Image: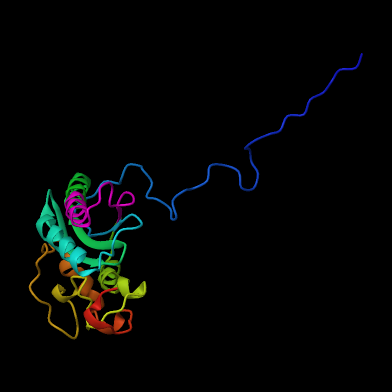
Amino acid sequence: MSQSTFEFKHRGGARPGAGRKRRAPRPLVPHRARPALTGRHPLHVTLRVVDGVQSLRSRAVHALLCSALRAGAERHGLRVVHYGAASNHVHLVCEAESARSLARGMKGLAVRIAHAVNRFLGRSGALFANRYHARELRSPREVRNVPAYVFGNARKHGAVVSTLLDPCTSAACFDGWAEVRGETTWLARARTWLLTVGWRRHGLLSIRELPRGTPLARGHS
């Protein structure tokens, strides 16, 4: 008698295209412990909203965003010094006394924004797509480059703006322009050396360094 043999079909394994497929359209912020913060370095923080939500730059939603930022700009040891709103995400320039201060302050701020926007739009559920992304700014050069990025980010993504400075940012309150004088800020005031003095070693920021957009009325995308 001869022994029968069977062939088994293999699933998974090391082959091109194997493994669980990513559902999110872009990489998510990994859920691992955030590094400790000393409070000496400013932070660049990004919050991204879920798909299908009205633009953060629309008049009513942007007003709600500003109201939430004003109320939560200085709480739990977190200070929001500048912001810039694109259609589906918001950039913040912040200072935090510790990692715990950053986590508590950002949680409270995100809840404020979500409650206000969801109530206005008549929706429920999560407003933000994933965890916020935070990056420490450790050098004067890094700190100087970030405001230009934050204030010009919406133009970079195709937003059209009719004014010299994007009204959906805190650019008008920035006191480091070479050409214009900044207004009194309605957000938190910077305290770190890097964000108050250090970045100026590389020169004031020029409006010419911002991306240029095509003018349209009201400056909203």
Check the image and report above or below for 117 versus 216: above
Q: Residue 26 appears in which quarter of the rendering?
A: bottom left
Q: Residue 143 appears in which quarter of the rendering?
A: bottom left
The one of 136 and 119 positioned closer to us in this rendering: 119
Total labels: the figure holds 0
Residue 81 x/y as whole percent: 16, 63
- Is residue 118 magenta-colored? yes
**Residue furthest top in the image:** 1
Check the image and report above or below for 151 versus 19: below
Q: Which residue does the image show at 20% across and 59% down from the upper left?
A: 94
Residue 114 x/y as whole percent: 21, 52
Is residue 100 shown to the viewer in this render? yes
Residue 109 x/y as whole percent: 18, 52
What residue range appears in magenta? 111-134
Q: Which residue does the image show at 73% across and 29% down from the upper left?
A: 8
Is residue 175 shown to the viewer in this render? no
**Residue furthest left in the image:** 184
Report the quarter where the C terminus lies: bottom left
- Is residue 164 magenta-colored? no
**Residue furthest right in the image:** 1
Q: Which residue does the image show at 22% across and 75% down from the upper left?
A: 201
